[in-house]
């Protein structure tokens, strides 16, 4: 994960993770000065643990049950086994008294499993996605086991305060003997006691490496590339932009339909307004994602069929992964950025767009159900479940006066400049440094 690389280099830490390919063996390698300790997964483990439990059960449930979750005992067994293997791998390599930082919903059982193996280490856990409200979380057959697994950590971090509140409510409801106390250390941390161990639970909203985006975005090369992009699109008056993983939580379909309806109604003009949608392939082995791709591509075809001119589609759709050096000029070219997921833990694309907007003249349309909405208050916040509100927000962004655009963007740029990914990591690790047996 790109966001953590600066912290790993700065602290001299190690990275434990899956290789990204099925099969193979556990290995220890050095990559650009970072110690990598891989954990191999078989085809069956990949299917059951990753595609099954993680992404066909937990992912939809944690994103407001937008799609129905599957609940298979074999997937849960694989999830438990792989989490145990991760805990054992970390226990083997962690130095005495080390700080161990575990990331994301794939590894929610690791904190307690690791604590049982190594009671000398400090354990942090950060969840990059939302944590569901209790009434949804109760659907999970293994709900108590998940919460108990998390409470093995000394510090449990989430993107939003509401996520932390949801997790504490689940722990209090599902486990006997859980004792939340009043906020401690700062107003965003709550102590939770369970079986003689105390965890601090709170919000640590993640950010980006602002300089990594801002510096090249302000350069001559990015400016030239942005000009070239506009020319290749037919020199439209306004370029609307979406950059997402092709995931059903991202709200790509409603966004495209809103754009199409604005064209149908004459509120947007296909000769003056175009939309570029980048859809990064992800989890292609999961049926929900295959269905989502077919639906998105059908919507794109229908809108282009109604509004494209010969040689000039009104929606330019890219189903591919773009490296950062290609995204930055695309961010610069985009006059209106559409970030409209149904639910998102943070959404770093929104922050990347703001960082790349060196001229301070873009507009961000942002779902109120993202963590980024807590910080980027000057964006046009919208309920993506409301088609009319989404259409109105897009139209407002397109028509916004230049002075207002500049004022909003300057305020958002000041916000992200004051909280970088390094600040995020340091704030979490500073709390972790004060907690646990090695503190």
Image: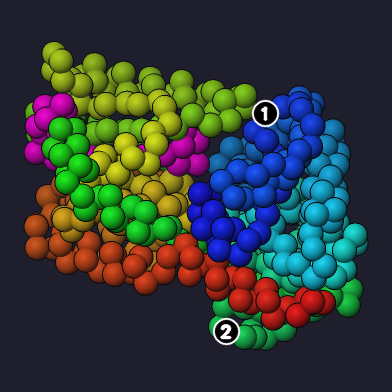
Q: Nearer the viewer, residue 343 or 215?
A: 215
Using a 10 Å C-alpha cutoff, classify the residue at mark 1 as few (fewer than 14 neighbours), some (14 to 19) or many (20 or more): few
Q: Which mark is residue 186?
A: 2
Task: Say which quarter of the image contains residue 7.
Answer: bottom right
Q: Nearer the viewer, residue 294 or 375?
A: 375
Secondary structure, mark 2, is: loop
The mark lying in front, picked from 1 and 2, is 1
The residue sitting at 32% across, 36% down in the picture is 326
Q: Which residue is mark 1?
A: 21
Image x and y of residue 299, in percent: 35, 24
Question: Residue extending furthest top?
Answer: 310
Relative to residue 63, is residue 309 drawn left or right?
left
Asked if residue 406 is positioned above or below residue 201 in the image, the reply reads above
| In the image, residue 248 lies in the stretch drawn in magenta | yes
Residue 334 seen in the figure: no
The residue sitting at 80% across, 54% down in the picture is 93
Secondary structure, mark 1, is: loop
Image x and y of residue 24, in percent: 76, 28
Q: Nearer the viewer, residue 196 or 388?
A: 196
Colour convention of the picture: rainbow
Q: Which residues are magenta?
A: 230-250
**Nearer-N-terminus badge (1/2):** 1
Image x and y of residue 26, in percent: 79, 37
């Amino acid at each position: 994960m790109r966001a953590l690389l600066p912290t790993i280099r700065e602290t001299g830490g190690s990275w434990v993770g899956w290789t990204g390919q099925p099969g193979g063996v556990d290995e220890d390698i050095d990559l650009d000065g970072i110690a990598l300790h891989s954990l191999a997964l078989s085809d069956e483990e990949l299917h059951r643990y990753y595609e099954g439990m993680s992404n066909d059960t937990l992912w939809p449930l944690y994103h407001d049950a937008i799609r129905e979750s599957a609940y298979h005992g074999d997937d849960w067994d694989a999830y438990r086994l792989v989490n145990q293997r991760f805990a054992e791998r970390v226990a083997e390599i962690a130095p005495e008294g080390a700080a161990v930082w575990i990331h994301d919903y794939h590894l929610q059982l690791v904190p307690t499993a690791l604590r049982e193996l190594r009671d000398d280490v400090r354990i942090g856990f950060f969840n990059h996605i939302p944590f569901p409200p209790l009434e949804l979380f109760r659907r999970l057959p293994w709900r108590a086991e998940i919460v108990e697994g998390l409470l093995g950590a000394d510090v449990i971090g989430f993107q939003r305060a509401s996520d932390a509140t949801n997790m504490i409510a689940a722990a209090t409801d599902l486990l006997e003997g859980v004792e939340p106390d009043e906020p401690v250390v700062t107003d965003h941390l709550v102590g939770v006691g369970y079986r003689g161990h105390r965890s601090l639970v709170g919000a640590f909203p993640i950010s980006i490496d602002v300089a990594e985006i801002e510096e090249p975005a302000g350069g001559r090369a990015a400016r030239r590339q942005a000009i070239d992009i506009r020319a290749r699109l037919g020199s439209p008056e306004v370029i609307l932009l979406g950059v997402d993983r092709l995931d059903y939580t991202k709200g790509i379909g409603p966004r495209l339909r809103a754009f199409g309806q604005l064209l149908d109604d004459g509120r947007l003009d296909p000769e003056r307004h175009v939309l570029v949608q980048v859809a990064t392939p992800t989890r292609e082995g999961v049926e929900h994602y295959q269905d989502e791709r077919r639906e998105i591509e059908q919507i794109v075809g229908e809108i282009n069929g109604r509004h494209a001119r010969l040689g000039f589609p009104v929606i330019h759709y890219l189903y591919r992964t773009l490296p950062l050096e290609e995204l930055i000029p695309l961010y610069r070219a985009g006059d209106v950025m559409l970030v409209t997921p149904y639910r998102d833990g943070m959404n770093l694309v929104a922050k990347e767009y703001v960082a790349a907007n060196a001229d301070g003249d873009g507009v961000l349309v942002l779902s109120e159900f993202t963590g980024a909405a807590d910080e980027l208050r000057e964006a046009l916040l919208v309920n993506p479940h409301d088609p009319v509100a989404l259409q109105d927000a897009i139209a407002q962004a397109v028509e916004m006066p230049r002075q207002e655009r500049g004022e909003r963007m300057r305020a958002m740029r000041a916000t992200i400049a004051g909280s970088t990914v390094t600040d995020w990591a340091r704030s979490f690790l500073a709390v972790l440094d004060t907690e646990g047996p090695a503190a």
